[in-house]
Image: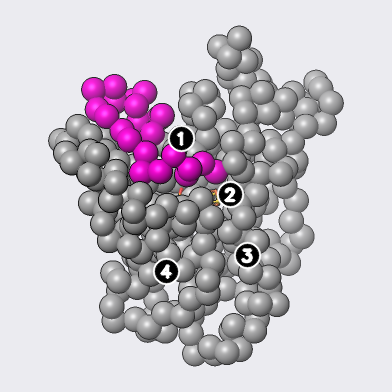
């Protein structure tokens, strides 16, 4: 059954000239039909270079918006309109304007997990894999970083020469993992390396052997000579790694790190969105549309990220 759906998706992608971009937190059956699987930086880079007429983003809304911002001439689809990122909505444009007034000498840097509207008010945007490099290259030692204070803390420790201001934002799924859980996992698996996302709490990141983006974690596990790993990020990464490297063992830092928003997209949503875009079925999914002023304002911020990264 899943194989049939996957074959139909492969056929329709070609017929309708669709590029399928898939974030690492999607389920394995979606990864198998992807043209590209990656972290948010890799997805943005790929979108910027794509020649396809249509792009489907299997991930969450800010990722689809990023594609539309970079590729206005393409039709961009999000299969499940409710797939948002709670972190992206934590700060309103009014809140950010007030912060910028409070810290006028600071360069406003936003995590890519933000709405297009927020990006219009920032100087540069970063992802978890590019934040240290990009902020390190900014010609100002004062950085207002929104909204993830955990990622901000991670970056600030790597760049001690800069002064940072944060708000209390972040990913509810990563921030839920505790130091006690991390310590318990280490005790249970003493031979394992602990790999975490920098959206985790600082005390969890401090205990880890490696902190990096979703792709960074997967690449580290692939390249490492170690055969056991505790994974501190969305638990889909554990199933992907277990399938790709059956000779290695992967344990969750916490069983609770599941992003329900990422889980909304299923292999059937992908097929239904393709059928709908091709006029072969009832409307499904959402075509991302942005007004030109918002798009251009947000593009400036993303272009700067692609230049500096
Ligand atoms: P990456 O940039 O590592 O893919 O992270 C995106 C994300 O939403 C992590 O929770
Ligand atoms: Fe957003 Fe967290 Fe889900 Fe990533 S895991 S998309 S940051 S809610």
Q: CA distance from mark 1 to mark 2?
A: 18 Å
Of callouts 3 and 2, which one flags the residue occurring earlier in the amino acid sequence?
A: 2
The quarter in which the C terminus is drawn is: bottom left
**Direction from residue 248 to residue 305 in the image, left or right:** right
Residue 231 position (above or below residue 273): below
Q: Which mark is residue 90?
A: 3
Q: Residues within 10 Å of mark 1 (few under 14, many from 20)?
A: many
Q: CA distance from mark 3 to mark 2?
A: 16 Å
Q: Which residue is mark 1?
A: 236
Classify mark 3 as within 8 Å of ligand 2 or not, answering yes or no. Answer: no
Q: CA distance from mark 3 to mark 4?
A: 15 Å
Q: Which residue is mark 4?
A: 152
Camera-nearest residue between 55 and 22: 22
Q: Residue at x 70, y 38 (%)?
A: 80
Residue 199 visible to the viewer: yes
Q: Residue at x 53, y 88 (%)?
A: 103
Residue 241 shown in magenta:
yes
Q: Position of residue 167 (x, y in %)?
A: 53, 74
Model colouring: one colour
Residue 64 visible to the viewer: no
Q: CA distance from mark 4 to mark 2?
A: 20 Å
The quarter in which the N terminus is drawn is: top right
Q: Are marks 3 and 2 in contact (CB under 8 Å)?
A: no
Q: Mark 1 or mark 2: which is in front? A: 1
Q: Position of residue 266 (x, y in %)?
A: 62, 28
Q: Are marks 4 and 2 in contact (CB under 8 Å)?
A: no
Q: Mark 4 or mark 2: which is in front? A: 4
Q: Which residue is mark 2?
A: 63
């Amino acid at each position: 059954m899943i194989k049939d759906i996957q074959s139909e998706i492969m056929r329709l992608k070609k017929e309708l000239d669709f590029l399928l971009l898939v974030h690492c937190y999607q389920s394995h059956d979606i990864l198998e039909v992807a043209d590209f699987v990656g972290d948010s930086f890799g997805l943005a880079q790929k979108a910027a270079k794509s020649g396809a007429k249509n792009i489907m983003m299997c991930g969450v809304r800010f990722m689809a918006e990023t594609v539309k911002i970079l590729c206005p001439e393409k039709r961009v689809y999000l299969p499940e309109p409710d797939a948002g990122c709670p972190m992206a909505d934590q700060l309103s444009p009014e809140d950010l304007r007030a912060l910028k007034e409070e810290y006028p000498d600071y360069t406003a840097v936003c995590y890519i997990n933000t709405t297009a509207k927020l990006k219009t008010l920032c100087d540069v945007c970063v992802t978890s894999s590019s934040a240290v490099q990009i902020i390190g290259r900014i010609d100002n030692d004062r950085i207002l970083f929104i909204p993830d204070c955990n990622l901000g803390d991670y970056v600030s420790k790597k760049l001690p020469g800069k002064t940072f201001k944060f708000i209390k934002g972040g990913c509810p799924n990563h921030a839920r993992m505790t130091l006690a859980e991390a310590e318990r996992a280490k005790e249970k698996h003493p031979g394992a390396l602990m790999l975490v996302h920098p959206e985790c709490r600082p005390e969890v990141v401090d205990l880890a052997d490696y902190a990096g983006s979703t792709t960074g974690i997967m690449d580290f596990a692939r390249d490492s000579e170690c055969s056991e790993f505790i994974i501190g990020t969305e638990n889909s990464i554990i199933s992907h790694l277990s399938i790709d490297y059956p000779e290695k063992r992967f344990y969750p830092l916490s069983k609770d790190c599941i992003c329900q928003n990422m889980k909304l997209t299923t292999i059937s949503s992908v097929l239904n969105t393709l059928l709908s875009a091709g006029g072969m079925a009832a409307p499904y999914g959402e075509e991302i549309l942005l007004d030109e002023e918002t798009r251009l304002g947000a593009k400036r911020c993303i272009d700067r990220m692609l230049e500096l990264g």
